[in-house]
Image: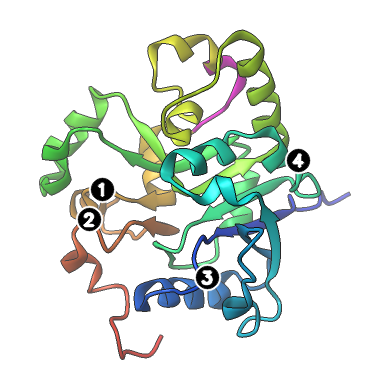
């Protein structure tokens, strides 16, 4: 008997009633490439979301308390909340797709089938690596650095993340850092938690998404664009201009 594909939903967090041109482009591309999957708008209770829902009737909205959208810290609290993932328990996976992400092609089911619990773009902490253009030097830096898999464009297995958070909350006090650092097991105290969350090696994660140093990442993947990218406006927009339509261009 043929095994059914894992179920997956695309989750787009928004916190204000307008999108800039690049965010509109990101959303349009998401719907164009990933429109066959359920797409959920995650928003504050006080935000209607009609500015998106009227244009894209297939998108559905799910609301959380306004307090989770007041700051980066409060948003991090939402993304490490078990209740957040319980709201998506009807799916095997969710793809967090912030409006500064951009998807190039539909490989979503294939990535779900790989069986990882969490995947994001490999990110480095050191600012000096953001401008690296040499793939070999970049590779050495990644191999010797603690890597965080960025959460802005990330695939998460719902049941695994719920289990992981239950175990973490049992043994530790609340997490105060960025939520993606918790799931990347970056902190020394999280070493025992590695047993409870399966993440890919950074080389494979690069084929899922680029974030920092996209030119070097492109060299490391032998000139292959990833499934998607994150923060393309922030990190080397000149590189991305070759692959992402600019204002006024037709997708």
Q: Residues within 10 Å of mark 1 (few under 14, many from 20)?
A: many
User: Looking at the picture, does residue 51 appear above or below residue 214?
Assistant: below
Residue 21 image offset from top left, x and y in percent: 36, 79
Q: CA distance from mark 4 to mark 3?
A: 24 Å
Q: CA distance from mark 3 to mark 1?
A: 21 Å
Contact, mark 1 vs mark 2 (Cβ under 8 Å): yes
Q: Residues within 10 Å of mark 4 (few under 14, many from 20)?
A: some
The mark that comes first in sequence, 1 or 2, is: 1
Contact, mark 4 vs mark 2 (Cβ under 8 Å): no
User: SS for tag 4?
Assistant: helix
The mark that comes first in sequence, 2 or 3, is: 3
In the rendered structure, does residue 197 fall within the stretch colored magenta? yes
Q: How is the image coloured?
A: rainbow
Residue range of the region highlighted in magenta in the rendering: 194-199
Residue 140 image offset from top left, x and y in percent: 18, 29
User: Looking at the picture, does residue 123 appear above or below residue 15?
Assistant: above
Residue tagged by mark 3? 30
The mark that comes first in sequence, 4 or 3, is: 3
Residue tagged by mark 1? 212
User: SS for tag 3?
Assistant: helix
Q: CA distance from mark 4 to mark 2?
A: 33 Å
Residue 182 image offset from top left, x and y in percent: 48, 27
Residue tagged by mark 2? 235
User: Looking at the picture, does residue 41 appear above or below residue 122?
Assistant: below
Give the mark toward the camera: 1 or 4: 4
Give the mark toward the camera: 4 or 3: 4
């Amino acid at each position: 008997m043929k095994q059914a594909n894992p179920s997956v939903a695309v989750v787009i967090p928004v916190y204000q009633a307008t999108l800039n041109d690049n965010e509109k482009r990101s959303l349009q591309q998401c719907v164009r490439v990933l429109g066959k999957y359920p797409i959920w708008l995650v928003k504050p209770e006080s935000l209607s979301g009609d500015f998106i829902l009227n244009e894209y009737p297939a998108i559905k909205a799910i609301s959380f308390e306004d307090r989770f959208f007041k700051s980066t810290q409060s948003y991090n609290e939402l993304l490490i909340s078990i209740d957040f993932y319980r709201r998506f328990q009807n799916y095997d996976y969710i793809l967090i797709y912030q409006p500064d992400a951009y998807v190039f092609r539909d490989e979503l089911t294939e990535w779900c089938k790989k069986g990882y619990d969490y995947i994001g773009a490999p990110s480095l902490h050191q600012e000096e690596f953001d401008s690296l253009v040499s793939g070999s030097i970049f590779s050495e830096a990644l191999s010797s650095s603690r890597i965080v898999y960025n959460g802005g464009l990330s695939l998460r297995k719902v049941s695994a993340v719920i289990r992981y958070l239950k175990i973490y909350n049992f043994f530790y006090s609340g997490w105060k850092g960025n939520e993606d650092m918790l799931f990347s097991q970056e902190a020394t105290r999280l070493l025992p938690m590695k047993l409870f969350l399966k993440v890919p090696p950074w080389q494979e994660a690069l084929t899922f998404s680029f974030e920092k140093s996209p030119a070097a990442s492109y060299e490391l993947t032998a000139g292959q664009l990833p499934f998607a990218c994150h923060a393309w406006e922030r990190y080397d927009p000149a590189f991305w201009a070759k692959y992402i339509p600019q204002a006024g261009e037709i997708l």
